[in-house]
Amino acid sequence: RQDDDELNKDDDCPRARVPRPSNKDYVVRPISAVEYSEKKGDGKKRTISRLDKIKRQQQDRKRNSKPMSIVKLSIEGNKMHL
């Protein structure tokens, strides 16, 4: 420890002083100044992230690029799409 103090006292050598780690335990924490509401879900919509938006656009492009599927017809007239 004496060697460190001697190095730090030396004015001829332009070195940065290295701080020593503190051994204190901070038991008393400062009071938070941030205000928050107790109510969960303030009615705001969840914002869509950029990644989700791009994924949706790619899925839409893929869906639109596929050829239209053949409509299944039955002879009896069941499940007819009008």
Image: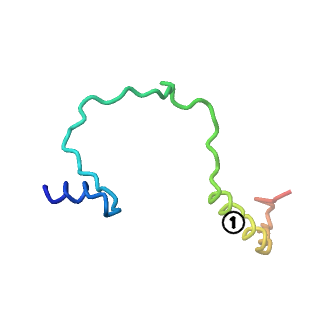
Q: Within the image, what quadrant is residue 70 found in?
A: bottom right
Camera-side residue of 43 and 9:
9
Q: Report x, y in % for residue 36.
A: 50, 27
Q: Report x, y in % for residue 24.
A: 20, 39
| Left or right position of 47 against 41 | right
Q: Report x, y in % for residue 58.
A: 70, 67
**Label 1: how many Cα within 10 Å (few below 14, some 14–19, many 20+):** few
User: How many numbered marks are there?
Assistant: 1
Q: In the current view of this chain or complex, which residue is farthest to the right?
A: 82
| Left or right position of 47 against 73 | left
Q: Residue, x 62% and y 60% (percent of image)? A: 51
Camera-side residue of 21 and 67:
21
| Quarter of the rendering occupied by the N terminus | bottom left
Work out whether 37 lies above or below 1.
Answer: above
Q: Residue, x 69% and y 65% (percent of image)? A: 59
Q: Residue, x 64% and y 39% (percent of image)? A: 45
Q: In the current view of this chain or complex, which residue is farthest to the left?
A: 2
User: Label 1: which residue?
Assistant: 59
**Amino acid beneath label 1:** Gln
Q: Report x, y in % for residue 63.
A: 73, 68
| Quarter of the rendering occupied by the C terminus | bottom right
Which element carries disc 1, helix, strand or loop? helix
Q: Residue, x 65% and y 57% (percent of image)? A: 50
Camera-side residue of 19 and 16:
16
| Left or right position of 1 against 16 | left
